[in-house]
Structure formats: structure tokens, C-alpha cells
Amino acid sequence: MISPDKSATSFLAKPAKPVIIIPHRPEKNYAELLSKEPKTKIKHILIAQPQPEGPKSPYFDLAEKYKLKINFSPFVKVEGVAGKDFRKQRISLNDYSGIIFTSRNAIDHFFRICDELRVKMSQETKFFCTSEAIALYLQKYTQYRKRKVFYGDMNNNKELRTLLIKHRDATRFLYICAEVRKDEIPAFMAANNFNYAEGMMYRTVPNDLKTVKPSEYDMLIFFSPSGIHSLFNSFPKFKQEKLKIGAYGKTTADAVLDKGLKLHIMAPLGNTPTILVALDHYLKDIHK
């Protein structure tokens, strides 16, 4: 049993290269921050993500519905931290009885590191996930039904925090993260005296966008702050002009606004839980 009266920071392993923290910001009224300029015809959209596999996708349905051309181009790529570099973080994986995953990337790179370091996790290890979809992805690497897997039903960090509190006193946690990560979960664990460490196992890096010509599009849609960084990495003198911009998630919207760009659609926001719904609403108004 881990003593709950010890400070969380006394257990915090320090990565060889510091994690870049995206601080938690006060809540904004994003609806008021959307551009109020008149809507114009949208004919060509670039989605800053890989193209969906297979012939069926809601994006393709949307393109057919509004007679659009939608292209896909991932603005960033994920690179794994080599096992030899992970060792420099002085983290022994089997010292932790609870592993926290907030994405499929985290799961992929956790089990990659386990393979590289020839580590076999105990059957008693608990896995904590932010959603059922992420929890089910564990089946790719382990026998799901034989594992202790915990996740919330609403896909949000509030439910994850409740689960972590429930297991706090008997679990030593390892939060699997990227080089750039949000502060919400680690800040919560530090504030509540969790026994935890952060394992930085992957990083997001810009893709070479030299073949992309933003001026050819009417709208760009981003899904992470890294996508905005990649845009300016390839086009330091980028000017928005008449280009419309969409963002998924608050941190992505913040990155758009921080660059002095205008934001035209966002999700989740109000009655638009997904970027597809937000895009559909925007296009519906134009094509009335």
C-alpha cells in the first residue's frame, strides 16, 4: 500500500527533456469569438488530418451533399521516443500499478516502449482511459477481458478524475504523454497528492507542407495546436486574407486566435458537438 500522506512531487520522475505544458486557461465564450464577417461560398476545403480509410466517410457524404471538393493532408506526424532515450527519464515501468491513457497514440507508444525495453506488465496493472473507445483499443495489445480497465461513459476528464480519486491511495500512476501535453490531468494529480509520474513516450512534429498551397482553399480545418504551429513552420509569412478557418477543441481554437487569425467554425460548441456538424451548419446557411 502506498502511503497517501507523501507529496506527489516527491515521486515525479523528471524526463531528460522537459515536457512542454499547455496550461489550463480560463473558460472563454468561444461563440462570441467566432468571426462575424459575412459567409461566402465554400467550394474547396482542406482537412489537416490523414484521409479516412475506405470509400465511406461522413466527409465524403458532406462533399457530395454540398458539391464540395475536400482534400486531406496531415499537418503533423507523431514520432516515438526511442527506448534508449526513454531510459534517461529514469522510469521503471513495473514500478507503476496504474497507467493513464488519453489517446490511442499513448497506447501505441506505451506498448512499443514495453517491447523495446522487454518489459512485461503485471496482470494486476490497472489501465485508466478517458473513453470506452480508447479502452477498447487496448485489445490491439493485450487480452482486454483479463485486464483491469477503467473508463468513463461521457468521454471527459471529469469522469477520469473521479476514477483516479477512487483508486488514489492504492495505486502508483504513470501518465503516458507527448512532449507537448495539456496540464489538466497532471495538475489535478499534483493538487491531490497522487503518487504519480509522467512518461513522455512520443512527440508531435510538423510535416513538410511544401506541396500544400493554402491559397487554393476556401477553408482550412485544424484539430490540434500543433497543426497551427506546422502551418506557420512551413509558411512563416502566412496571411489569412479571405480564408476561413475551423478548429476542433478549445486548445486548437486558442492557437488560432493567439496567431491573430479569425475563427469561423468550432466544435464542440453549443449544438455542434463535432466538426462535421459545425461544418454542415455553416454550409447549410450558405446554400439556402
Image (cartoon, rainbow, N blue to C red):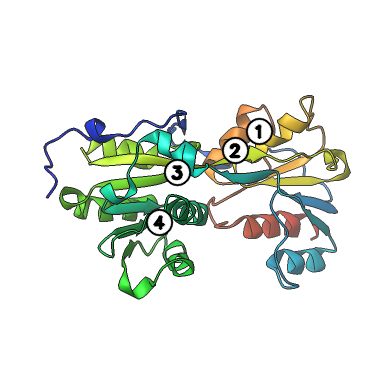
Residue for point 79% across, 40% down: 209
Q: Nearer the viewer, mark 2 or mark 3?
A: 3
Q: Earlier in the sequence, mark 4 or mark 2?
A: 4
Q: Which residue is mark 2?
A: 225
Residue 140 drawn above or below residue 270: below
The disc placed on residue 229 is 1
Residue for point 80% across, 59% down: 287
Q: What x and y, as percent, mark residue 216?
A: 88, 44
Tell me whether circle 1 and circle 2 mark residues in contact (CB < 8 Å): yes
Q: Which residue is mark 3?
A: 177
Residue for point 49% across, 51% down: 109
Q: Earlier in the sequence, mark 2 or mark 3?
A: 3
Name the secondary structure under disc 3: strand
Name the secondary structure under disc 1: helix
How many C-alpha atoms fall within 10 Å of the one at disc 2: few (<14), some, or many (≥20)?
many
How many C-alpha atoms fall within 10 Å of the one at disc 3: few (<14), some, or many (≥20)?
many
The disc placed on residue 113 is none
Q: What amino acid is at disc 4?
A: Thr
Q: What x and y, as percent, mark residue 225?
A: 59, 38
Q: Which residue is mark 4?
A: 130
Q: What amino acid is at disc 3?
A: Cys
Name the secondary structure under disc 4: loop
Q: What x and y, as percent, mark residue 105?
A: 52, 53
Q: What amino acid is at disc 2?
A: Pro
